[in-house]
């Protein structure tokens, strides 16, 4: 294991008004590690991810990407904001973020979506970026949609395009914020297949998801968040087979019950 | 030739004036509108409230009184008459352009602001997540989407501006309405003159509406029903 | 008190040299002609909206022509048409029916509010059309299914709801009336703009008078907005549900 974690957070605290959404969360992901982040709604999973790439700002604690701490400063209203815009933009460009709502740019075609940031943020030569984008679209399986606009793609296709867009930035770490939660059930599989292949390639990934079975299969480590704190973490098989925490046990039981009701077990 | 034909030829010289008035004030007004919209959205102290006040005043008072203030009101100050701007401010044409510009800037800024606010938050977040910020974010993502969303309302504003140029006749300028009024008061052929002037304005506004509709269609291939695709950026196969 | 304020008050106040009374009277004239025009606009707009929705092709065509043409030409042109055209028509009637002599002019107020009414009616028609489309199709169908005739349907289902949905648009139309009233000054009607101009020309102080006039317009438009907002809130409350 290399000494420097790919991405780490230390003692993150985040409040929305009186509500504490993250309470001293510390987590580190090594290079090539896939971390599955599980928890009930409101447990702080998405907020954690969004604090890492600066879409939300933690009130206390540090975010460290590749050994570099994101500098913060206090702002009006009591919270904190990033101190250096340039540093934040640079770090964001090294983190690939996949949204629950895909968030493809509606005025650009699929291919244009993928090449936008590499060209305009990373200033890479256009020919190289387009070639790589074509290959990525091929890899996620929507090469034939390259010149279509997002509105004409299904949810699963849009999410795969969004993943290609994130990959085009050549990120060190991929952050997935509930990538399949907004998809119709029959479209979930195609996206999970892409995520699995990325995990098998050895990419560093933080995967916030409700797909517990998938998380168990694909992750090197599972982290279970409850009301803003890490309740338990560890290797997936061990954790699921013998839950060290009562709450996690209850969480798994609810999941199994739900699957039974849906006829999957 | 007939009276209609004569009237048409008599009013025609006013058309370029109308069009130039409109073009100049729309162009300058749009630039100001974008600046004001950004200023308001920035939330900066002093600047944002000042723009709010400006918009409130210029939308709450008639264009006619704004034009009068600039043409008659400014002229009474010796400082204005001595200034370098006087050659312009004494001309009804430039006073009209200034009044029209300031007026459309106020309405336009609200339209642009609405357009910017209508950009889906998720798409802005995705751009930020990719490392875009500031001018890049505005130029590549927010701007294009905002403009596309604002186009219908702004197209309407353009048509209102063509009609607004008629007010320049109240400060002695001889654009289409000014010429029509002069012909009516000298020949008393009210209905024919009105008909000719009306047809001219309807032609201008009709053409404008058609251009705006075309622009809307071109900017929104992604929204039209057919799966029209964008330019093929891929490498040759 | 600062000197400029003293001289302003002497000019605009209610003293012997003050123009305050005239300005306020002119402001009242502005409101009067705007209100009359707005009322006429409501009638014309209602008719036009009804025409466009009606089955009669001629009615729909006439209404559509009216709204499209009027919204495409300057209000000033309509004012000239009504003022001079009205005088021409009256003059023709005067000469042919009563064998009178000379010209008859249409009183400025009447020409003014008719012109405002014609122009505003076109916009109000669009407001009513939009409001009508917002009323749930289902409620109208339910009325038909219950055997309500056109008139009963209109009275009991459509009209009560129409006003609620039309209020915001009507607020806009009212503001248009106020702006247009300033244009009536070309007929010589002494509303606020004309009065400001007269005062300014007389005292060679256009700026003070026009600025005061502008301030008075702002007062009128602000009070109007507040009243319309109040009306909208009350309309929402009395009908129970959110828009």
Image (cartoon, coloured by chain):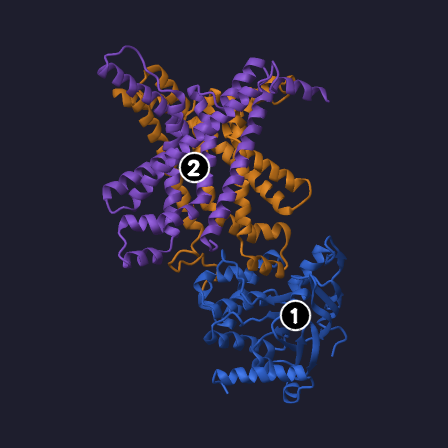
Residue drawn at (61%, 47%) of the image: B41
Coordinates of residue A216 in the picture (x, y in percent) = 60, 82
Q: Is A51 displayed left or right of B227 in the figure? A: right
Q: Residues within 10 Å of mark 1 (few under 14, many from 20)?
A: many
Chain of the residue where label 1 is placed in the rendered structure: A
Q: What is the number of the mark on residue C98?
A: none
What tint does the image give chain C? purple
Q: Nearer the viewer, mark 1 or mark 2?
A: 1
Q: Is residue C60 above or below residue C98?
A: below
Q: Is residue B35 above or below residue B135?
A: above
In the rendered image, is residue B28 in sight? Answer: no
Q: Is residue B201 above or below residue B190?
A: below
Alpha carbon of mark 1 to alpha carbon of mark 2: how far? 51 Å
Coordinates of residue A239 in the picture (x, y in percent) = 66, 85
Coordinates of residue B6 in the picture (x, y in percent) = 30, 20
Residue drawn at (45%, 44%) of the image: C167
Q: What is the number of the mark on residue A44?
A: 1
Q: Nearer the viewer, residue A170 or A59?
A: A59
What tint does the image give chain B? orange
For the residue labelled by badge 1, is the local secondary structure a helix, a strand or a loop? loop
What tint does the image give chain A? blue
Q: Is C12 displayed left or right of A260 in the figure? A: right
> To which residue does mark 2 refer?
B159
For the residue labelled by badge 2, is the local secondary structure a helix, a strand or a loop? helix
When asked about the image quadrant of residue B79, the answer is top right
Dots 1 and 2 on the same chain: no
Q: Quadrant of the N terminus of chain C?
A: top right
Chain of the residue where label 2 is placed in the rendered structure: B
Q: Is residue B134 above or below residue C74?
A: below
């Amino acid at each position: 294991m290399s000494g420097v974690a790919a991405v780490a957070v230390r003692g993150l605290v985040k409040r929305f008004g009186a509500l504490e959404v993250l309470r001293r969360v510390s987590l580190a992901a090594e290079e090539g590690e896939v971390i599955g982040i599980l928890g009930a709604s409101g447990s702080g999973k998405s907020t954690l991810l969004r604090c890492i790439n600066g879409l939300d700002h933690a009130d206390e604690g540090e975010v460290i990407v590749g050994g570099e701490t994101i500098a913060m400063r206090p702002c009006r209203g009591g919270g904190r904001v990033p101190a250096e815009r340039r540093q934040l933009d640079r770090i964001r460009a090294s983190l690939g973020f996949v949204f629950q709502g895909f968030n493809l740019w509606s005025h650009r075609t699929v291919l244009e979506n993928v090449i936008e940031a590499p060209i305009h943020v990373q200033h890479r030569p256009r020919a190289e970026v387009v070639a790589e984008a074509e290959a990525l679209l091929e890899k996620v399986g929507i090469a034939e949609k390259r010149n279509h606009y997002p509105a004409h793609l299904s949810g699963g296709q849009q999410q795969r395009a969004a993943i290609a867009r994130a990959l085009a930035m050549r990120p060190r770490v991929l952050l997935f914020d509930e990538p399949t939660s907004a998809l119709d059930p029959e479209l979930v599989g195609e996206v999970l297949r892409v995520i699995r292949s990325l995990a098998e390639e050895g990419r560093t990934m933080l995967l916030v998801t409700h797909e517990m079975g998938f998380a168990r299969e694909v992750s090197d480590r599972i982290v279970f968040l409850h009301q803003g704190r890490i309740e338990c973490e560890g290797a997936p098989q061990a954790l699921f087979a013998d839950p060290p925490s009562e709450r996690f046990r209850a969480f798994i039981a609810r999941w199994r019950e739900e699957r039974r009701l849906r006829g999957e077990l | 030739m007939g009276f209609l034909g004569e009237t048409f030829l008599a009013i025609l010289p006013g058309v370029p004036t109308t069009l130039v008035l409109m073009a100049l004030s729309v162009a300058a007004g749009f630039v100001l509108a974008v600046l004001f919209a950004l200023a308001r959205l920035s939330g900066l102290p002093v600047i944002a409230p000042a723009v709010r006040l400006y918009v409130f005043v210029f939308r709450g008072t008639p264009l006619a009184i704004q034009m009068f203030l600039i043409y008659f009101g400014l002229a009474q100050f010796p400082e204005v008459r001595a200034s370098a701007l006087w050659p312009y401010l004494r001309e009804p044409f430039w006073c009209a352009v200034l009044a029209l510009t300031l007026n459309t800037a106020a309405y336009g800024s609200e339209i642009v602001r609405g357009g910017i606010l209508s950009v889906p938050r998720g798409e802005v977040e995705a751009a930020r997540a990719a490392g875009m910020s500031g001018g890049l974010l505005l130029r590549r993502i927010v701007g294009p989407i905002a403009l596309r969303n604002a186009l219908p309302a702004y197209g309407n504003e353009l048509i209102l501006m063509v009609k607004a140029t008629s007010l320049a006749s109240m400060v002695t300028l001889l654009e289409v309405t000014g010429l029509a009024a002069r012909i009516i008061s000298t020949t008393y052929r009210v209905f024919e003159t009105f008909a000719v002037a009306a047809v001219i304005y309807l032609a201008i506004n009709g053409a404008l509406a058609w251009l705006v509709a075309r622009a809307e269609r071109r900017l929104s291939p992604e929204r039209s029903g057919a799966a029209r695709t964008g330019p093929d950026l891929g490498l040759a196969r | 008190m600062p000197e400029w304020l003293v001289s302003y008050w002497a000019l605009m106040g209610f003293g012997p040299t003050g123009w305050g009374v005239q300005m306020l009277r002119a402001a009242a004239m502005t409101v009067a002609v705007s209100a009359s025009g707005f009322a006429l606009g409501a009638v014309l707009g209602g008719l036009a909206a009804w025409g466009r929705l009606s089955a009669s092709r001629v009615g729909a065509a006439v209404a559509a022509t009216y709204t499209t043409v009027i919204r495409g030409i300057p209000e000033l042109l309509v004012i000239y048409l009504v003022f001079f055209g009205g005088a021409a028509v009256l003059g023709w009637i005067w000469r042919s029916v009563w064998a009178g002599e000379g010209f008859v002019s249409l009183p400025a107020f009447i020409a003014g509010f008719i012109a405002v009414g014609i122009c505003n009616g076109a916009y109000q028609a669009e407001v009513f059309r939009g409001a009508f489309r917002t009323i749930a199709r289902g409620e109208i169908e339910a009325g038909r299914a219950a055997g309500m005739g056109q008139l009963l349907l209109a009275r009991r289902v459509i009209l009560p709801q129409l006003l609620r949905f039309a209020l915001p648009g009507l607020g806009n139309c009212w503001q248009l009336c106020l702006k247009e009233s300033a244009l009536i000054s070309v007929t010589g009607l002494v509303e606020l703009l004309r009065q400001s101009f007269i005062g300014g020309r007389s005292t060679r102080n256009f700026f003070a008078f026009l600025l005061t006039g502008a301030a008075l317009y702002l007062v009128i438009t602000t009070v109007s907005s507040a009243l319309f907002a109040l009306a909208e809130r009350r309309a929402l409350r009395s009908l129970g549900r959110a828009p």
